[in-house]
Image (cartoon, rainbow, N blue to C red):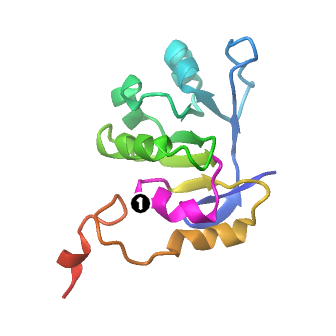
Amino acid sequence: MARMIKDAEIVNCDAQLLRLEGDGSFAELPASGLVIVPLAQYLAQKTALISRGDVGVWFAPDDEPESLGADAASLTLIAVEFPAFTDGRGFSIGRLLRERFGFVGELRAFGDVFKDTMGYLKRCGFNAFVVNSDKNLEDALLGLNDFPEAYQTGLDQQQPLFRRRT
């Protein structure tokens, strides 16, 4: 079973990520178990997926959090794909889901995720990370604390440094 980082601990990855088929059709849902479906599939099959339970939604970099809107607050898992190190749109998606749409559940980053990005992802509200399989998971975990102080506010620190100084 694959492993990941969640809430600063290494745990087993408990969900199956479904992708669109090659022809663009939706993937077939397994009979049971936690699944993470693409945003388009969730929007098209929302009623059936909600009644099924055990479902999360994943965002591609070009998906808009506004299309999920208030439904974000009712989900327990949202994943955001980072297809390349140079693609930072997922940082904004995570922050918007937390701040504007009231998402409080597990916010999972997957794709090109590694130690150097973990602290920044945490500042944007991510609390779960599926690290590249060619990277050391224990080493990546250390990335959550690479920078113990930040000057500006973030989802992990609500006051700027000058206000926290005594």
Please give the residue where the numbered disc 1 appears in the rendered image: 123
| Quadrant of residue 158 within the rendered picture | bottom left
Q: In this view, does 7 lie to the left or right of 113?
A: left
Q: In this view, does 9 lie to the left or right of 89?
A: right
Magenta stretch contains residue 122? yes
The image shows residue 47, relative to residue 134, as above or below, that is above
Q: Is mark 1 on a helix, strand or loop?
A: helix
Q: Residue 39: horizontal and vertical position, in percent? A: 53, 25
Q: Is residue 85 left or right of residue 120?
A: right
Q: Going 37% across and 63% down the picture, which residue do you hit?
A: 156
Q: Type of residue at label 1? A: Arg
The image shows residue 85, relative to residue 120, as above or below, that is above
Magenta stretch contains residue 42? no
Task: Return the residue nearer the eye: 35 or 125.
Answer: 125
Q: Looking at the rendering, in which quadrant would you find the C terminus? A: bottom left
Q: Residue 85: horizontal and vertical position, in percent? A: 60, 50
Q: Please give the range of residues in magenta.
A: 111-126
The crowding category of the residue bearing disc 1, from other C-alpha atoms within 10 Å (few below 14, some 14 to 19, many at least 20), is some
Task: Return the residue nearer the eye: 33 or 21.
Answer: 21
| Quadrant of residue 161 within the rendered picture | bottom left
The image shows residue 93, relative to residue 37, as above or below, that is below
Q: Given the current orientation, which residue lies at the most extreme front position?
A: 86
Q: Residue 132: horizontal and vertical position, in percent? A: 72, 53
Q: Going 53% across and 34% down the picture, which residue do you hit?
A: 61
The image shows residue 87, relative to residue 52, as above or below, that is below
Q: Residue 5: horizontal and vertical position, in percent? A: 63, 60
Q: Going 68% across and 60% down the picture, which residue do you hit?
A: 11
